[in-house]
Image (cartoon, coloured by chain):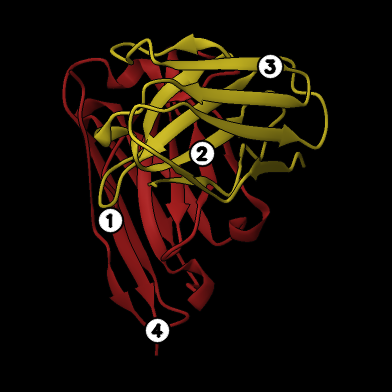
Amino acid sequence: QVQLVESGGGVVQPGTSLTLSCEASGSTFSKYNMHWVRQAPGKGLEWVAVIWYDGSKKYYVDSVKGRFTISRDNSKNTLFFQMNSLRAEDTALYHCARDALAYCDDDCRAAFDIWGQGTMVTVSS
Amino acid sequence: EIVMTQSPATLSVSPGERATLSCRASQSIGSLLAWYQQKPGQAPRLLIYAASIRAIGIPARFSGSGSGTEFTLTITSLQSEDFAVYYCQQYNNWPPYSFGQGTKLEIK
């Protein structure tokens, strides 16, 4: 069974940067689109970004466009999330999640079948 | 952007009873809806996709129905491990993917 383990969270000041990682077990990482989904303390789930299985396409929620960058290294089974110009409202538990369909490309429509437990990012002065 | 609205916010049900959770989309999403279960300190778990198909390993007491804008998750014969927060998610029209605000299922 594939597992996803996030790391890299911490307490940072507003305006600073942080990079999150998500390491996947198994040999199928390169076949799946990957997402970052965040959850503010005591709140619900908010989708933040997706990257295509081959890294060719990336999409973001409007609130992070231009500040956050999703990337991946398929040779290391690892997903990344570079977060710049952090704001208090970015404070959340950040989960990585996998598309339920392999090689999902144009017009992809898939639920998220595997999730990591998350890494906490706190932005505070 | 499609807005997902779940009701009720909190549902109190006795073990062994049936729970019915609702999810409404602000516009038609066909059947491209998923349900997730989340327990405190744990990752979300996919229960249902395509509105009515149970994910691998999900017990038959969980069932989903609906299409278009109105969806329902039904849990029969509630077990102690079923008390959690449940989220619906649309994946028909993105970005962004959108989740409902969640329904907390608590023990009555």
Q: CA distance from mark 4 to mark 1?
A: 16 Å
Chain B colour in the picture:
yellow
Element under label 1? Answer: strand
Colour of chain A in the rendered structure image: red
In the rendered view, tell whether residue B54 sits above or below residue A86.
Answer: above
The residue wearing badge 4 is: A124
Q: Amino acid type of disc 1?
A: Thr
Respond whether the residues carrying marks 3 and 4 are from the same subunit. no
Q: Are marks 3 and 1 on the same chain?
A: no
Q: Looking at the picture, how far across and down is residue B11, in whole percent?
A: 51, 45
Mark 4 or 1, nearer chain start? 1
CA gap between label 3 and label 2 equals: 15 Å
Task: Examine the rendering and report whether any part of residue A2 can be seen.
Answer: yes
Q: Which residue is mark 3?
A: B66
At x 29%, y 76%, the residue is A11
Residue at (28, 13) in percent of width and height: B57
- Pair 3/1: label in front: 3
Comparing A106 with A125, the one in front is A125
Is A102 on the left or on the right of B59, as rendered?
right
For marks 2 and 1, give the one nearer the viewer: 2
Residue A119 tag number: 1
The verdict on a common chain for dots 3 and 2 is: yes
The disc label shown at residue B87, or none:
2
